[in-house]
Amino acid sequence: MARYPVLERPLPPGLVTLQDYAHDIGYSAEAIRVHWRKLPGFPEPVGQVSRPAGLPAPVYEARRLETFRAAHANTWGRRELQRVVTDRDLDERVTLEEFAGQLAGTGVQDVARYREAGGFPGAGEDGRCRLGDLVAFWNTRPILLTGQDPEQRVNLGQAARILGMARKTLSQYRDSAGFPAAGPDGLRRLGDVVDFLNTGRPGKRGPSARDVA
């Protein structure tokens, strides 16, 4: 007898396997299975689907996975920057001012400057956004290079200082596929380093961000 109800593909809207969910957020399903499931509050499956080889794949409610992720800062990647962790209803609709109020030392102008970045949540006619959408965007927001020349050539230490990162945090990606190679001068184009962190970093679709002045 199946442990959970057996479902058929395509799954109904709102239901996902860990493989599907991991792909959508730029993680590996193995990382979620090994690490996330040890954290408190990880949701129970609501069903399972067969797969060509191996055990059936458990199926989860995407909303419950999203709620779980919002409650744990260490499910958003490894950069040590401010993230949003909340136990509020993610379907609550809030203004940017109310959202900024949850971020220590961050004003609404700091949040609003990301409006032109791809993926920023759209507001309804009342000017409010879904809290869960703001949390997801803020925790994976792109690095914005303002006041810095992306063409400048830098070593990893200089890049880390500009981006507000520890050098060892940046250096850990040096041997990753897609990380910009140093030129004959031993330096890298700053814009290439930022592009990698925003789009090419292993284990994430995009990193948490910092506005670089």
Image (cartoon, helix red, strand yellow):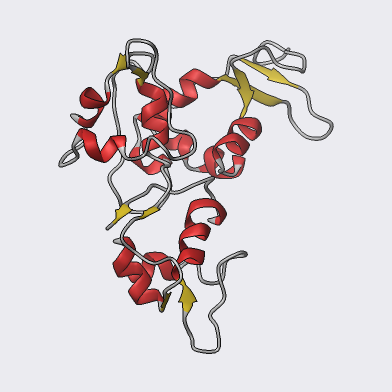
Q: Nearer the viewer, residue 144 or 207?
A: 144
| Numbered marks: total | 0
Q: Nearer the viewer, residue 3 or 170?
A: 170
Q: Is residue 148 left or right of residue 55?
A: left
Residue occupying the far bottom of the picture: 184
Is 11 drawn above or below residue 184 in the view shown?
above
Percent from the top left, x then y, of residue 195?
51, 58
Q: Is residue 60 left or right of residue 128?
A: right
Classify the position of the N terminus by image quarter.
top right
Percent from the top left, x then y, of residue 2?
71, 14
Picture quadrant of residue 75: top left
- Residue found at x 34% / y 68%: 160
Report whether residue 40 is seen: no
Classify the position of the C terminus by image quarter.
bottom left
Percent from the top left, x then y, of residue 200?
56, 55
- Residue found at x 37% / y 43%: 74
Q: Nearer the viewer, residue 137 or 78?
A: 137
- Residue found at x 59% / y 35%: 24
Report whether residue 61 is seen: yes
Q: Is residue 62 left or right of residue 71?
A: right
Residue occupying the far left of the picture: 105
Percent from the top left, x then y, of residue 118?
49, 38
Is 44 drawn above or below residue 54 in the view shown?
above
- Residue found at x 34% / y 75%: 158
Residue occupying the far right of the picture: 52
Picture quadrant of residue 98: top left
Picture quadrant of residue 137: top left
